[in-house]
Amino acid sequence: MPILIRIILQRLLILIYSFLAFLGIAPEASIPTEEEAIIAIEERQQAITDFFNEKEIKKTIDKTVEIGKDIAKEIELDTNTIEKPTTNYSPDDIFDDSEEVVNQNDQAEETPIKQSSSSIEDVIVNIVCSQDNLSFINVSTGSGVIIDPKGIILTNAHVGQFVLIEDQQKNSSMRCAAYKENIPTFGYELDVLYISPDWIEENYNLINSKNPKGTGEFDYALLYITGSTNPAIRKPRNIPYADIYLNEFIYKEDQEVVVAGYPGIPQNIIDVARAGTLKIDNVLIKDVFTFNTRTIDIISTTKTEVGARGASGGGVFVNGNLIGVISTTNGEQNNANINAITTTYINRNIKENTGETIKELLAKDHIETILKFSEEYGINLSNLLFNQM
C-alpha cells in the first residue's frame, strides 16, 4: 500500500512539473525514478534509525556515569587520605632486623631459587699457600667460591690470612694462588679485597696451630683475582661465578644441599697435587644455630667425605646458588658433619662493619676497595699474624 501511494504521488508531481513547464516557470530539477526514490527513502530511514540508536547509547553511558557518582558518594572515597610509602626497601634489607627474621621465613619461602648458569666445578677453587723457611716449606690449602665475574672469591678468614701476609709482608716468602681442577695449566694470583678484622684480632695467635678450633664466627674473607700464574695467559675478562643467595627461608632441617671443596691435608709441596682434588656431595641440613641473635648464622649438615681439612672455604649450594661457606667440621676426617656460616650472616656482618651489603661491596671499584682496606687494616692485621709465625 505505501508503494502505491508513492507511485500516485510521483504521477502527481509529474503532472505539476509539466504544467509549470508549459507556463515556463518550472525549476531545474530531475525527477527520480521509482528505484531511486525507493533507495532514497531507505537511506533516510537508516539515518533516522542510527540517530535514535546513538541517543540510546548516550543515555546508557550517562546513566552509568550517574550510578558511578552515586556509589562514590555512598562510600565517601577521598583519594587525599591514601598514604604513599615513604621508604624504599631492597631485598637485602629484609633480614637486617635480627628480631624479625625468623618470623619472616614463611613469607620468604614464596620466592624460589633459580638454577645457576655456572656449574659448581667452574666456581670452586683450591687456594694453595706455601712459605719457604729455608730448611722446609710450609704448605697450607683451603677452598673458595668465585662469586663475581670479575674474580671475587669468598672463603674463610683462616684461609685468607695467608694471602694477607703475602700482600702486606713482602719479606715473608709467602706465595699464594688459587687453582681449578678443570684448568690445570695455570692458577690465579690473589689479593685481599676484605677480610674480617674481628676474626684476625681474636684468632691471630692460632696461625701456627695444626688443628685450630673455632665456632666460625667472623670467619670469612673476600679475595680478588689479580692475574694469572702463567705469564703467557691473561686473566679471563669474565670468570664463571655462583650467585649469592640472601634469603634465610632456605636454612631449614632436611633441606637438600650440595657441598663442595678440596679436602686434604698436604704435608709438603709434593702432597699439594694429591690434595687438590675437588669433591662434591649431596647432603641434608641437619641443624641450624645462631651466635647470639635470633638469626640463622650456622648450618650443620649430615656426614660427608667433603668434611675434612682443606674443604674450609668451600661452598654449600642450592641449585648452584651459594647459601653457605664451609668453616669447621665435626667427626672423623673425610666422614664428618660440615658446619657452614650462612651467606646471610656474612652479609649482615659485612654491613655492620662497612655500612655496605656484600653485593654493594662487589659493585664498587675493586682496586679502590683493596687500597682502602690495606690502608685501614692491612698492615696492622698482617703484623699480628706475621709476628706469630
Image (cartoon, rainbow, N blue to C red):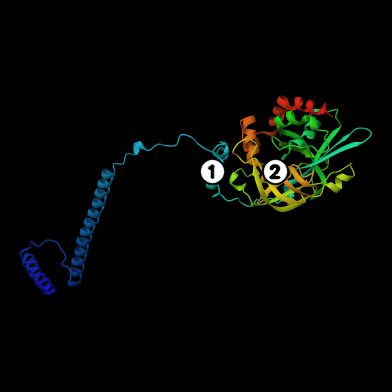
Quarter of the view holding residue 163 = top right
- Count of picture labels: 2
Residue 273 in the image: state x and y as whole percent: 86, 47
Which residue appears at 25% of the width and 56% of the height? Answer: 57
Tag 1, which secondary structure? helix
Residue 231 in the image: state x and y as whole percent: 83, 40
In the image, residue 360 sits, relative to residue 263, either above or below, namely above
Q: Relative to residue 26, is residue 141 drawn left or right?
A: right
Q: What residue is disc 1 on?
A: 104
Q: Identify residue type, mark 2.
A: Ala
User: CB of mark 1 within 8 Å of CB of mark 2?
Assistant: no
Closer to the camera in the image, 233 or 91: 91
Closer to the camera in the image, 116 or 55: 116
Q: Relative to residue 381, is residue 31 drawn left or right?
A: left
Q: Quadrant of the N terminus?
A: bottom left
Which residue appears at 18% of the width and 66% of the height? Answer: 41
Q: Quadrant of the C terminus?
A: top right
Q: CA distance from mark 1 to mark 2?
A: 22 Å
Closer to the camera in the image, 68 or 309: 309
Q: What residue is disc 2 on?
A: 340
User: From where the camera sits, is residue 365 visible?
Assistant: yes
Closer to the camera in the image, 211 or 93: 211
Which residue appears at 24% of the width and 53% of the height? Answer: 58
Residue 239 in the image: state x and y as whole percent: 72, 45
Tag shown at residue 289: none
In the image, residue 359 sits, relative to residue 11, either above or below, namely above
In the image, residue 16 sits, relative to residue 169, either above or below, namely below
Q: Pick whichever of labels 1 and 2 is earlier in the sequence.
A: 1
